[in-house]
Image (tube, helix red, strand yellow):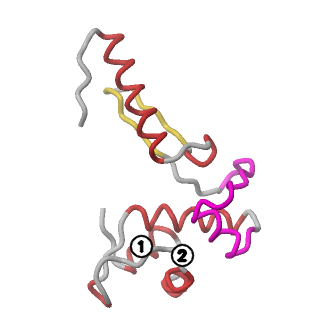
Amino acid sequence: MKFNLKQLSEQADVPERSIRFYIQKGLLPRPQGETRAAVYDHGHLADLLRIRQWQQAGLSLDAIGGLLQGHTAAPIAPARPGAVEVRSHLIVADGLELVVAPERAGLTQAQLRRLFHAVRSAYAEELGEDVVDP
């Protein structure tokens, strides 16, 4: 999914000015393209939601920068009503969905992909079917 700056701002509930500042500080990657033609993707949205979540937990922008660079582990505060979190959804089959909060589970994107593949494989094996990757 692609967003312009205004759409990204609305989706993340973060002011456009803050998004530009985060890019300038290196907290967010630059968009594809320049000026009004710049395009942001789901990764930008996920990073913005993480930044907002960590700011609400009281972390400084320097600490958040370290987390986004992978230098330190993210502190996980208990979930509370109204909190915004990034979730990954795997539709295994009609009526069967796996939902994971990667930060809470302590999973990297590569580990999350392996988990999803393992779940699909286990489900297919249970039904006696071959695994078909999307």
The image shows a total of numbered marks equal to 2
- Point 58% across, 64% down: residue: 68
The x, y position of residue 108, in whole percent, is 52, 47
Q: Is residue 67 magenta?
A: yes
Three-letter amino acid code at the position of disc 1: Leu
Query: Which residue carries the number 2 mark?
Result: 14
C-alpha span from label 2 to label 1: 8 Å
Q: What quarter of the picture does the C terminus occupy?
A: top left
In the current view of this chain or complex, which residue is farthest to the bottom? 35
The label on residue 8 is 1
The label on residue 96 is none
Q: Is residue 113 left or right of residue 68?
A: left
Highlighted magenta segment, given as a residue range: 59-82
The x, y position of residue 43, in whole percent, is 42, 62
In the current view of this chain or complex, which residue is farthest to the front? 71
Q: Are marks 2 and 1 in contact (CB under 8 Å)?
A: yes
